[in-house]
Image (cartoon, helix red, strand yellow):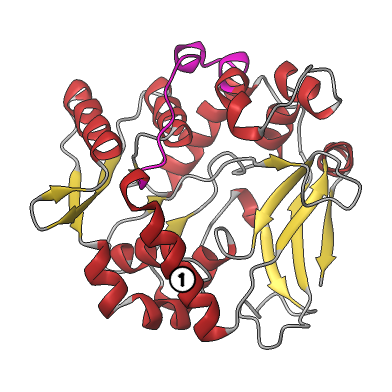
Amino acid sequence: MIFSKNNHLNYWYNNDPNILYRENWYDIISFQVGGISRSPAYFKAECITAAKEIYDLYPNIHIGLTGGLDSNVCLESFLQAGIKPGIFIMKFMREDNELNPLDANYAIEKCQELGIDPLIIEVDPIKFVAENMMSTSKEFQIYSMYQALHIHTCRDFDFPFITVDEIELRRDCHPKNLWSFVKKEDQDMCWRRFSNTTNVRAINNFFTWSPELMLSFLKISAVEKLCTGRIPGKVSWNSIKNLIYADGGFPKFIKYKKTWGVEKMAGLFAIATANIEKEFKWETRDCYIEYNQLKQALENGGMTCRYI
């Protein structure tokens, strides 16, 4: 199964690439990123190339569309490539009450605008917590309600789909507080466990699809300024993401209002996630590669990092 181009982005435990589940808390995470095979084009062009390459592999590809910025840039990349992908939308409901109206309704309206007939899945998150959350979390070693809910909803899909990732840059993971590329044991690695266990074709790599796409992102002017301390004031990853995508060739999203999709359920998600951690004594780890180190790795054949 192909998760990224040539499966250049990969995770495993200890020294065996076939071990995708943690057996002990002292197991070491191995995290691999590949190197470029050509000079990258600018970011938007690489996004369009990624869309074409994914479509060539999976012609029935579906995108999980939300009101979020990342999934909309992903969809725009496919459209710019001349491809209308399938769309699925998760609508959180409790009886007759919509729990993510900003998120789901935006996605539905977007599909109507494009003439795409989406698959709309109604999910009762409270019922999920009561009946399926713990068993799903245990089966796929998931650390949060958010990921468990999505994986449980997608497990019967008979089509390949993208759960859109991001190239997340943070400072709090690095011991010296340096801007670093971060991948999470929960949010990213659980989808690999899910796909390998069920054979459901879940691709959690769009913006990390290829080394060329990753490097083109790191070379966006706004990203370079952010990671080299040339943007004044206190900034966070989310607060500058609109500017980054606009600077990378998607200016239509400069004023886009980002939604999380669970604004009405933040308390439920926090409590349920805490219950998962309490039940299984799990604490997620993060993998990180410092910004300049990642650029060098992508340009020089890739690297494998190991984390306790």
Q: Quadrant of residue 202?
A: bottom left
Report the span colored magenta. Answer: 245-262
Between 68 and 278, which is closer to the camera in this rendering? 278
Looking at the rendered structure, the secondary structure element under dot 1 is helix
Specify the quadrant that holds the C terminus: bottom right
Position in image of residue 178 (x %, y %)? 86, 41
Position in image of residue 51 (x %, y %)? 47, 35
- From this view, report whether residue 126 is shown above or below residue 44: below
Position in image of residue 71 (x %, y %)? 42, 36
Position in image of residue 216 (x %, y %)? 70, 27
Q: Residues within 10 Å of mark 1 (few under 14, many from 20)?
A: many
- From this view, report whether residue 14 is shown above or below residue 149: below
The single residue placed furthest to the bottom in the displayed view is 23
Between 234 and 113, which is closer to the camera in this rendering? 234
Question: Which residue bears the numbered disc 1?
Answer: 194
Residue placed at 30% from the left, 31% from the top? 84
Residue placed at 22% from the left, 23% from the top? 114
Residue 111 inside the magenta-drawn segment: no
Q: Is residue 143 left or right of residue 7?
A: left
The single residue placed furthest to the top in the displayed view is 251
Residue placed at 69% from the left, 66% from the top? 285
Residue 259 inside the magenta-drawn segment: yes
- From this view, report whether residue 263 is shown above or below residue 52: below
Q: Quadrant of residue 15?
A: bottom right
Between 236 and 1, which is closer to the camera in this rendering? 236
Q: Tell me which amino acid carries mark 1.
A: Phe
- Judge whether residue 253 can be spotted in this image: yes
The single residue placed furthest to the left in the displayed view is 96
- Judge whether residue 196 can be spotted in this image: no
